[in-house]
Amino acid sequence: MNSRREFLQKISGSAIGLGILPTLASAACATIPGEINDGPVLRVAILGLGGYATRVAEAMVNCKRAKLTGLISGTPEKIKAWQAKYNIPDKNCYNYENYDAIKNNPDIDAVYVITPNALHKEEVIRVAKAGKHAISEKPMAISVKEGEEMIEACKKANVKLLVGYRMHFEPHTLEIIRMRNAGEFGKITFFQGLSGFVSGDPKQWRLNPALSGGGAMMDIGIYSVNGSRYMIGEDPIWVNAVETKNDPVKFVQGIDETIQFQMGFPGGAVASCLSTYSMNWLDRFFLDGLNGFAELHPATSYDPTQGLTHKGPLNFPNTVHQAVQMDEMAAIIFDGKKPIVPVNGEEALKDLKVIEGIYKSAQTGKTVNLQL
Ligand code: NAD
């Protein structure tokens, strides 16, 4: 496997083949079941037309409240192909030099930044300065300082800053959060998060620290960091971490290959997590309480999420995560809707604070106290 995308596809396909997962019709369910959305449509330009952007654009076709109306790319051929596919007029297409002019384009409400991690900060700030709402892919930035600058810029420009945390709208995940809030697991004691896959192409930007800002932790380990917080329902107060590197040629200085990390939470729960670029089949969350447990496996791959609790399997529809996310983001932006788990800049900044703590602990061998 040479990409995260292939990992996500492989884990779904193989699990189905092995009969681990039921074969579910790939429901293009663009709303959280039971909700009817009608309101203004969020007109979105995508900045960076790569792998994940392709997935987001395809998902948005089924959105009720979000529509792809603009394109920003450094590659004219890509713009042409996307224009034809999504019927985007020339006047809504930009390159990386001229997209500040989006300011004067009434067809675009928001820009979704889907480029390498290290570019998010500058791009989001330019979007904010153009007076458009900014949606950034995860990780929001490559440092806490950058994240803070982005939040500040969006506040100053009076635009929303949202981050592509698609699992925050996923029905199995939300049911576990509901059960936890209802006390069905009792006192929460433990979370385990396993996030990893074997990283392929050594030339990809993900293995270049200047573009990625880190290795597996920034890319896939962030799911266990974020997941620990929404599964336990608290923010960690300490972290310690150990890094191991078996392939220092492929995983150069600044690119973490494998990190095991533990966290402590104010209510007494502890978490034990693994982030890696050199092991397959790691996409599992486990939440333990004194009266019950919950498992998500796969926990964060695109489709289908599977959930199990002490009461039995969770049978919720599988959604197209990106479609639900974009419809929900329209409701957040236009209706001021408050999602059950936030997807704003402040939420994403907390993950960056934990990740900085993890890196610091791995370097120093000491436990790092956190103040999120
Ligand atoms: P990708 O390599 O497939 O696409 C990156 C795009 O950025 C390409 O179109 C590339 O041309 C463009 N780009 C612009 N400037 C560039 C530069 N200087 N160097 C390299 N590329 C440049 O990557 P991707 O998988 O689409 O990831 C993009 C972002 O989306 C990352 O932040 C990643 O973490 C995030 N992502 C999120 C999910 C999710 O499930 N939420 C999944 C995959 C990726």
Image (cartoon, helix red, strand yellow):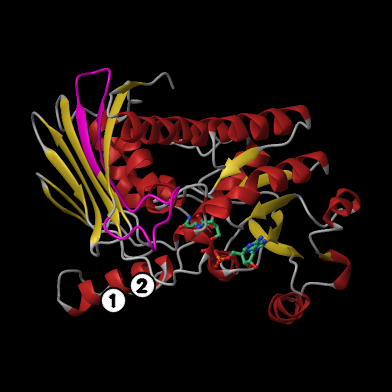
The three-letter code of the residue at mark 2 reads Gln
In the picture, measured across the screen, residue 364 lies left or right of residue 326, that is left
**Percent x, y of residue 228:** 30, 37
Residues at circles 2 and 1 in contact by the CB criterion of under 8 Å: yes
Is residue 335 one of those drawn in magenta?
A: no
Residues 172 and 266: in front is 266
In the picture, measured across the screen, residue 352 lies left or right of residue 66, that is left
The residues colored magenta run 246-273
Q: Residue at the location (54% across, 69% down)?
A: 51
Name the residue tied to disc 1.
Answer: 13
**Percent x, y of residue 80:** 76, 80
> Does the magenta stretch mainly form a helix, a strand or a loop?
loop
Is residue 256 one of those drawn in magenta?
A: yes
**Percent x, y of residue 34:** 42, 51
The three-letter code of the residue at mark 1 reads Gly
Q: Residue at the location (16% across, 33% down)?
A: 190
Q: Is residue 330 in view? A: no
User: For the residue carrying disc 2, how many other residues have a C-alpha within 10 Å: few (<14), some (14-19), or many (20+)?
Assistant: some
